[in-house]
Image (cartoon, coloured by chain):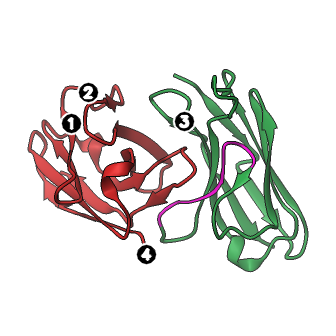
Chain colours: A red, B green
Amino acid sequence: EVQLVESGGVLVQPGGSLRLSCAAAGYIFSRYWMHWVRQAPGKGLVWVSRINEDGTTIDYADSVKGRFTISRDNAKNTLYLQMNSLRAEDTAVYYCARDVAGGDDYWGQGTLVTVS
Amino acid sequence: DIVMTQSPLSLPVTPGEPASISCRSSQSLLHDNGNHFFSWYLQKPGQSPQVLIYWASNRASGVPDRFSGSGAGTDFTLKISRVQAEDVGVYYCMQGLQTPYTFGQGTKLEIK
């Protein structure tokens, strides 16, 4: 069974930093693109970032470019999101997701980041 | 960025009746490989999103066959042949043709 378990979400002050983790299990992690998508309270879905199978191709939404860094450790089956210079508008549930738009989509349950 | 526009935003449906949601993109979602990089998601209350349809018309694994997707270019439709109580939630369309991936505003389906 595929599992994606996010962790690391906490209450942090504006300007602070945080690292989210997403532990993958039940499939060959290194064979898939991975994504972060966020959802502010009561709002819709917003794509944040993606990384390819070996970490050589990375893209970001303009709203987080220069502040967030996506990375992965295929030996540990883990996806990361380093979040710096956090703002109130970064408050959201952050989902990690596999193969978004690729046909083998799977999303984790999310972790809540509150910037206040 | 590609803009995704859904309609309607609210959809009350009687159980057993059909339902339809439309999504329009600001540019064609046709990839060079012949697929449309377009997906439909359902986010049930308190849950994470789950894919229903990918590449515009392919039903994801485990999705009931009452869900179907159609469309091409910039116009896409999700149809539910007979709505069931378990189908309540917010439906999102999404384009994955180019970054940033973008989502529609969401359509909230409720049972009458």
* Magenta-drawn segment: B48-57
Q: Residue A20 carries which label?
A: none
Q: Do labels 2 and 3 share a chain?
A: no
Measured in 3D between alpha carbons, the distance from the residue under mark 2 to the one under mark 3, in whole angstroms, is 19 Å
The residue under label 2 is which amino acid type?
A: Lys
Instruction: Classify mark 4: residues with Cα within 10 Å, few (<14), some (14-19) or many (20+).
Output: few
Q: Residue at horizontal 70%, vertical 41%?
A: B6
Q: Residue at horizontal 72%, vertical 54%?
A: B10
Q: Are discs 1 and 2 less than 8 Å apart at CB?
A: yes
Q: To which residue does mark 3 refer?
A: B96
Q: Are discs 4 and 3 less than 8 Å apart at CB?
A: no
Q: To which residue does mark 2 refer?
A: A65
Chain of residue at mark 4: A
The residue under label 4 is which amino acid type?
A: Glu
Q: To which residue does mark 4 refer?
A: A1
Q: Are discs 1 and 4 less than 8 Å apart at CB?
A: no
Chain of residue at mark 2: A
